[in-house]
Image: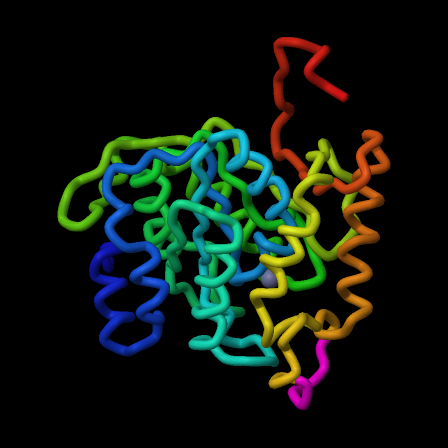
Amino acid sequence: MLTPACRRQVRTCSGAVSALTLEYVGTRTRHMKLDILAIGVHPDDVELSASGTILRHIAMGQKVGLLDLTRGELGTRGNADIRDQEAADAAKVLGVSVRHNVGLKDGFFVQNEASIRAIIPFIRQYQPNIVLANAISDRHPDHGRAAKLIAEACFLSGLSKIETNWEGQSQEKWRPKNVYHYIQDYQLHPDFVVDITPYMDQKMKSIFAYKSQFSAPDSEQYAEEQKTPISGEDFMQFMYAKARVFGRYAGYEFAEGFNVAKPIGVRDLGDLD
Ligand SMILES: [Zn+2]
């Protein structure tokens, strides 16, 4: 198995991860505890579905990091190098503490021991209380498969007999308290919604960082590429409409919706809207 450090070296040698991405991750990776680790199988999944929630929690003083499982190299528009740069740009817009890429194969990753062992070191390194994961089922089959893979990695990360390393150091077990699945393309019924009203504009800016994928300001250079279900202006209208629908459940203008795999507890019913 490759350790995270080895994987970064391999990808650096191949030029697969941009210098900017590595520089952005930089020196802040050691011994940093995160409140939330948001994981997506493709760069942009988190921005599309949970970036308002991330912005809200960063504004509350919490530390949030991002982990992409693949580089989205099978995407119809752009290419992996362009998407690396866009992911680094989006991370800056959101103000997250770190962003890493596991380097699994877009479209062809499988839920097996190797994939789980590749993810666990990141969970143990950052010890998040909460992990945000892909939608339980969705239009893109990678999303539902990733949802199961991430949830399983979070559980197995808590078993001490599974040994992992980070930059040559053995790691302690760590199981996040909760895994929440953000709703992306299919209109699943949410188990809870998060008010993102003050952060809607900044959420859209993080999405616009993916100029090769979406109809964004300054994305004219990609106008001649093939059209996809997400590349038109209508998709941006869908983003606002979806946020309004989720917001309506709880009386917010805009919200993001989440599903839970297990019931969640609350100590003060007054905390719920
Ligand atoms: Zn995706």
Rendered-image quadrant of the N terminus: bottom left
Answer with the quarter of the image where residue 161 lies: top left
Find residue 179 and report its horizontal and vertical position in percent: 54, 35
Answer with the quarter of the image where residue 19 lies: bottom left
| Viewer-proximal residue among 189 and 30 | 30
Residue 224 forms part of the magenta stretch: yes
Secondary structure of the magenta portion, mostly?
A: loop
Find residue 29 and report its horizontal and vertical position in percent: 28, 46
Residue 23 forms part of the magenta stretch: no
The stretch of residues the image draws in magenta is 223-228
Q: As drawn, is 26 to the left or to the right of 195?
A: left
Find residue 153 and report its horizontal and vertical position in percent: 42, 43
The outermost residue toward the left is 168
Number of marks: 0
Q: As drawn, is 53 to the left or to the right of 161?
A: right
| Viewer-proximal residue among 91 and 161 | 91
Answer with the quarter of the image where residue 260 lies: top right
Find residue 185 and report its horizontal and vertical position in percent: 73, 57
The residue positioned 52% from the left and 54% from the top of the image is 93
Rendered-image quadrant of the C terminus: top right
The residue positioned 43% from the left and 76% from the top of the image is 81
The outermost residue toward the bottom is 224
Q: Is residue 85 above or below residue 120?
A: below
| Viewer-proximal residue among 43 and 150 | 43
Image quadrant of ligand 1?
Answer: bottom right
Colour setting: rainbow
The residue positioned 34% from the left and 34% from the top of the image is 33
The residue positioned 33% from the left and 50% from the top of the image is 117
Q: As drawn, is 215 to the left or to the right of 171?
A: right
